[in-house]
C-alpha cells in the first residue's frame, strides 16, 4: 500500500469493485491468449502482453508509484500471460 500511496480504511473488508474489475480483465486476457493459441499466433500475444506491461509501467510512473510497486504490477501481468500460455500449451 505504501508503494502506491494507498491508505487502509480500517474496515478490514475486501475491496470488491477492484476485485471484480481484475476478474473481468483476467478473463479477457485469457480469452485473447486462447484465441491467439488457436491461431498459432504466439508473437501476437507476446506483443499484446508487452504493450499492456509498458502501459502499466507508464501509468505507474505518471502516478509516481515506487519502483517496487511498478515492478510488482508489471510482473504480475507478465506472470499471468506466461502461465496462460503454458496452460494453453498443455491443453
Image: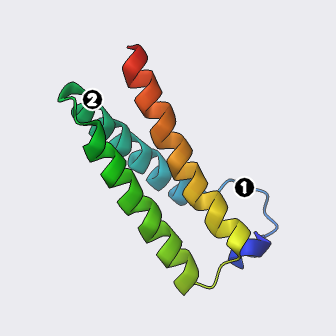
Q: Which of marks 2 and 1 is nearer the N terminus?
A: 1
| Location of residue 21 by image quarter | bottom left
Q: Residue furthest right?
A: 10
Residue denoted by label 2: 37
Q: In this orientation, which residue lies closer to the viewer: 85 or 31?
A: 85
Along the viewing direction, whichever of 61 and 14 lies nearer the viewer: 61
Q: Residue 13 carries which label?
A: 1
Q: Which residue lies furthest to the front in this view?
A: 43
Instruction: Mark 2 vs mark 1: give the one in front.
Output: 2
Q: Position of residue 65 (x, y in %)?
A: 65, 78
> Quadrant of the image for the N terminus?
bottom right
> In which quarter of the view is residue 42 placed?
top left
In percent of width and height, residue 29 lies at 36, 44
SS under mark 2? helix
Query: In the rendered view, does 7 fall on the left or right side of 60?
Result: right
Q: Residue at x 38, y 14 (%)?
A: 91
How far apart, in angstroms, are the residues tagged by discs 2 and 1? 38 Å
Which residue is located at x 38 percent, y 20 percent? 89
Q: In this view, does 27 lie above or below 54?
A: above
| Image quarter of residue 36 | top left
Q: Position of residue 16 (x, y in %)?
A: 57, 54
Amino acid at each position: 500500500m505504501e508503494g502506491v500511496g494507498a491508505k487502509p480504511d480500517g474496515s478490514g473488508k475486501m475491496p470488491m469493485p477492484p476485485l471484480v474489475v481484475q476478474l473481468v480483465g483476467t478473463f479477457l486476457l485469457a480469452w485473447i491468449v486462447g484465441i491467439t493459441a488457436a491461431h498459432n499466433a504466439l508473437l501476437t500475444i507476446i506483443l499484446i502482453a508487452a504493450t499492456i506491461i509498458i502501459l502499466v509501467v507508464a501509468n505507474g510512473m505518471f502516478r509516481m508509484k515506487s519502483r517496487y510497486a511498478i515492478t510488482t504490477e508489471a510482473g504480475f501481468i507478465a506472470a499471468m500471460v506466461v502461465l496462460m500460455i503454458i496452460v494453453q500449451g498443455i491443453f
